[in-house]
Image (cartoon, grey):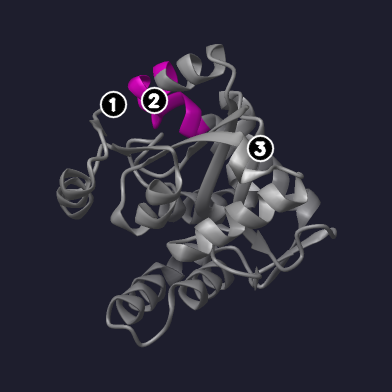
């Protein structure tokens, strides 16, 4: 039976969220003048919180403001790599690293499934020794420029589980022949934790910790 361990990234593996810091890092690296749009980015997030716009559209708008609507991939990638170095150096939980090492030693295929953009999740995952990444894609993921537009679904909540199942189908993985572990800090990953054979609430916020108590999911604190 194949073993797979799926980790959420932000606040599960990392101490802090990575998205806002990514946008700021990219603006500073590529076009510091774009930092004048930070107040507008804040308004976009307020619009999301008030449900005037959805999560995907908020991400697209903030990328357009702080990175640009269409930016050369060759120009973007050095800044992306330096951001991955920054995350791994100062924003990764030591307990998460220990669990990743244990899962690897037990023969698990290591997967990150994150709502963050594949653009920067992949280099972070590579540095941490993960085998696969399931994440939010850009519309132009495979061409020579980055567009401020999401391809398919934002890898979040029930969409994350759908994307994991689609990935398993592409890989020819039979769910009945897999022992699946999953780790997340947030209640929006409840569908994934329920789908797993072993679902762990890792560094959970209050809503997930309460749900974990009802569902019998172990709580781990890294």
Residue most extreme to the front: 176
Total numbered labels placed on residues in the image? 3
Residue 21, labelled with which disc?
A: none
Question: Please, what secondary structure does the residue beneath circle 2 have?
Answer: helix
Magenta part, dominant SS = helix
Residue bearing mark 1 = 222
Q: Earlier in the sequence, mark 1 or mark 3?
A: 3
Residue 132, labelled with which disc?
A: 3
Q: Position of residue 186 (x, y in %)?
A: 31, 51
- Residue at left offset 35%, top offset 26%: 93
Residue bearing mark 2 = 96
- Residue at left offset 50%, top offset 69%: 59
Q: Give whichever of 103, 10 is nearer the camera.
A: 103
Q: Position of residue 108 (x, y in %)?
A: 57, 24
- Quadrant where the C terminus sits is top left
Question: Please, what secondary structure does the residue beneath circle 3 have?
Answer: strand
Q: Earlier in the sequence, mark 3 or mark 2?
A: 2
Q: Residues within 10 Å of mark 1 (few under 14, many from 20)?
A: some
Q: CA distance from mark 1 to mark 3?
A: 22 Å
Side of 66 relative to 195 (left or right): right
Image: magenta residue range:
86-98
- Residue at left offset 63%, top offset 27%: 1
Q: Earlier in the sequence, mark 2 or mark 1?
A: 2
Side of 204 relative to 147 (left or right): left
Residue most extreme to the right: 143
Q: Give whichever of 185, 64 is nearer the camera.
A: 185
Q: CA distance from mark 2 to mark 1?
A: 6 Å
Relative to 69, residue 186 above or below: above
- Residue at left offset 47%, top offset 34%: 87
Residue most extreme to the bottom: 52
Whether the residues at callouts 2 and 1 have beta carbons within 8 Å, the answer is: yes
């Amino acid at each position: 039976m194949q073993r797979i361990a799926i980790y959420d990234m932000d606040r599960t593996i990392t101490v802090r969220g990575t998205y806002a810091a990514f946008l700021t890092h990219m603006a500073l690296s590529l076009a510091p003048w774009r930092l004048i749009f930070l107040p507008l980015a804040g308004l976009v997030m307020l619009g999301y919180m008030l449900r005037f716009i959805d999560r995907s559209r908020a991400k697209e708008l903030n990328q357009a403001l702080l990175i640009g609507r269409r930016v050369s991939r060759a120009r973007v990638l050095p800044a992306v790599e330096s951001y991955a170095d920054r995350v791994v150096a100062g924003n990764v939980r030591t307990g998460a690293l220990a669990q990743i090492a244990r899962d690897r030693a037990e023969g698990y295929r290591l997967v990150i499934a994150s709502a963050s953009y594949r653009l920067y999740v992949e280099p972070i995952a590579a540095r941490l020794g993960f085998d696969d990444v399931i994440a939010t894609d850009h519309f132009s993921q495979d061409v020579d420029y980055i567009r401020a537009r999401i391809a398919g679904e934002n890898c979040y909540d029930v969409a994350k589980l759908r994307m994991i199942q689609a990935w398993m189908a592409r890989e020819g993985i039979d769910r009945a022949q897999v022992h699946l572990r999953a780790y997340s800090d947030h209640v929006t990953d409840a569908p994934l934790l329920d789908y797993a054979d072993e679902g762990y609430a890792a560094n959970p916020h209050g809503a997930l910790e309460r749900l974990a108590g009802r569902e019998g999911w172990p709580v781990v604190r890294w």
